[in-house]
Amino acid sequence: MPLDCGVVIMRKRALGQGQVGDIDFLRRTLAVSRQVQRNGKGYEIRPPKWGSERTVFLAPTLVGMLTEHIKIQSPGDDPERWLFMELGGDPSHHNTVGSRWRTTMLAAGLSGFRMHDLRHFFASGLISRGCDVVTVQKALGHHKATTTLNTYSHLWPTAEDRTRAAAEALLTEAQGGSAQILADSLRTERTKQSHYQVE
């Protein structure tokens, strides 16, 4: 499960680049501040490409999952130990991550889902809960807001969608005899009467 949650936040290649010290458990954030470049001799650490350093805001449930994962998979006191690592202690290779994903899919009896689809799931969930373009852009690490819009613009509600939703909520509250609706209606009527008297 932590692997799946990690993919929701980061790209597959970035999963092996996170360290325990990147997580602020009190503020419930994760700092994305490096990338691991593979070479013939091993790997080297570099800044993220395209200036995609960012702080990801973590759901409390995910913080709990990561806490348990670290206790089991990455115990110790060194803040620079990797969140996801190979048996030898090196950061997980993206091929290893992909293999674990396929194993998980097979065990769950699922097929046809890519790891990257979890990022789309994450983005669509943020949008459906009212997050704006800049918020989603930062959460996904897109260099430009236009990248986010080009990919997800069809998911944001239009003005017409918001009007329909507001009208539906209004009708639901009115049918339930909402005291707030009645109070607002009375205030509006009194304001109109006062306006006419002044004229």
Image (spheres, helix red, strand yellow):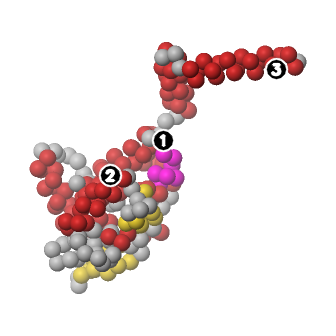
Q: What residue is disc 3 on? A: 195
Amino acid type, mark 3:
His
Rendered residue at 30%/56% (across/down): 64
- Picture coordinates of residue 59, whole percent (x, y): 37, 52
Question: Is residue 101 covered in magenta?
Answer: no
Q: Quick one: 179 or 199, which is closer to the camera?
A: 179
What amino acid is found at the position of numbered circle 1 in the picture? Gly
> Which residue is labeled 1 in the image?
130
Which residue was labeled with disc 2? 61
Which residue is at the far bottom? 41
What is the x, y in percent for residue 107? Answer: 11, 50
- From the viewer's perspective, is residue 176 above or below residue 45? above
Foreground tag (1 vs 2): 2
Span highlighted in magenta in the image: 131-137
**What residue is at 25 percent from the left and 75 percent from the top?**
76
Are circles 1 and 2 on residues that touch, CB within 8 Å? no
Q: Provide residue 176's location: percent of width, then percent of height.
A: 48, 17
Picture coordinates of residue 175, whole percent (x, y): 49, 15
Q: Quadrant of the N terminus?
A: bottom left
